[in-house]
Image (cartoon, grey):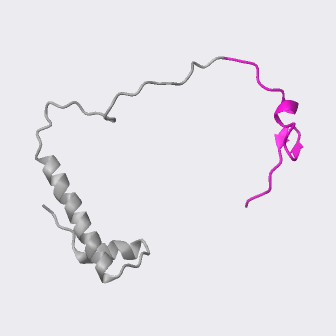
Amino acid sequence: MAKITLGEVEHVAHLARLNFNQEETEAFTRQLNDILEFVDKLDALDTSDIEPTTRAIELLNVFRDDEVRESLPVEEATGNAPVSEKGAFVVPRII
């Protein structure tokens, strides 16, 4: 099993612009190594007869079928807007 070192945690923290004290760095190192140890336990399981899935339980599509319908008239859609112009909403410029 690969072990994560204090130096690796410090390096990643530096790249992420995070400041940890020595106690926090040691705690993160222990926690990450615990996670890797758990993953190693999972790797030991025989999953050759297990079909790959994306979810633990099957989900059903709860969306309605698409139907072509009449749209709102532009005047009604923009009627409550504080400011509209030429059938569009006018919003403050951000850039």
User: Which quadrant holds residue 28?
Assistant: bottom left
The residue drawn where x is 64% and y is 17% is 67
Q: Quadrant of the N terminus?
A: bottom left
Which quarter of the picture shows residue 34?
bottom left
Residue located at (33% from left, 35% from top):
55
Identify the magenta region: 68-95
* Residue 94 on image: x %, y %: 74, 59
**Is residue 76 within the magenta segment?**
yes
Relative to 19, does residue 47 appear above or below in the rendering?
above
Q: Left or right of 43: which side holds 35?
A: right
Residue 30 highlighted magenta (yes or no): no
Q: Nearer the viewer, residue 39 or 12?
A: 39
Q: Position of residue 31 (x, y in %)?
A: 25, 65
Overall secondary structure of the magenta section? loop
Would residue 49 be found to the left or right of residue 18 on screen?
left
Q: Position of residue 38 (x, y in %)?
A: 18, 54
